Amino acid sequence: MGEARNKEVPMLRYQVNDMSCGHCVQAITAAVREVDPLADVTVDLSTKSVEVATAAAGPRVSEAIRAAGYTPEEATQAPTPARVSCCGGR
């Protein structure tokens, strides 16, 4: 199992500014997996970014996210992690 998946799989990156909660994460993940059940989907709500490792074509993935009710924009680079500090950064 997974022999074909051992090859380098393209990483697609999207900025999805209209996602805001765990339901959004589940809906986007399910939509992408409808296109490719083996896709590795990583969603970061703090940066509103979605990364998808998939053999599926990018337009199919972004259309699936749109069909789920969101507006993905292609991101050209990995998101910058949100800075988290205690005490309000003091």
Image (cartoon, rainbow, N blue to C red):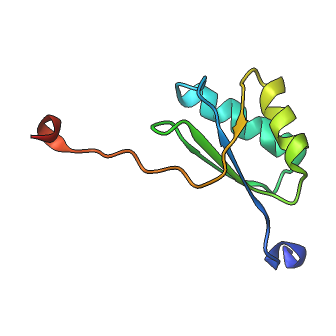
Q: Toward the viewer: 67 or 72?
A: 72
User: Residue 39 falls in which quadrant of the image?
Assistant: bottom right
Q: Position of residue 55 (x, y in %)?
A: 87, 60
Residue 85 vertical position relative to residue 1 in the rendered view, above or below: above
Q: Residue at x 16, y 40 (%)?
A: 89
| Image quarter of the N terminus | bottom right
Q: Give the left or right position of residue 16, taking residue 55 as reference.
A: left
Q: Residue at x 28, y 44 (%)?
A: 84
Q: Residue furthest left?
A: 90
| Image quarter of the C terminus | top left
Q: Disc count in the image?
A: 0
Q: Residue at x 86, y 33 (%)?
A: 63
User: Residue 35 falls in which quadrant of the image?
Assistant: top right
Q: Give the left or right position of residue 49, taking residue 89 as reference.
A: right
Q: Position of residue 51 (x, y in %)?
A: 66, 50
Q: Give the left or right position of residue 47, taking residue 6 as reference.
A: left
Residue 66 vertical position relative to residue 52 in the rendered view, above or below: above
Q: Residue at x 63, y 44 (%)?
A: 50
Q: Position of residue 24 (x, y in %)?
A: 62, 27
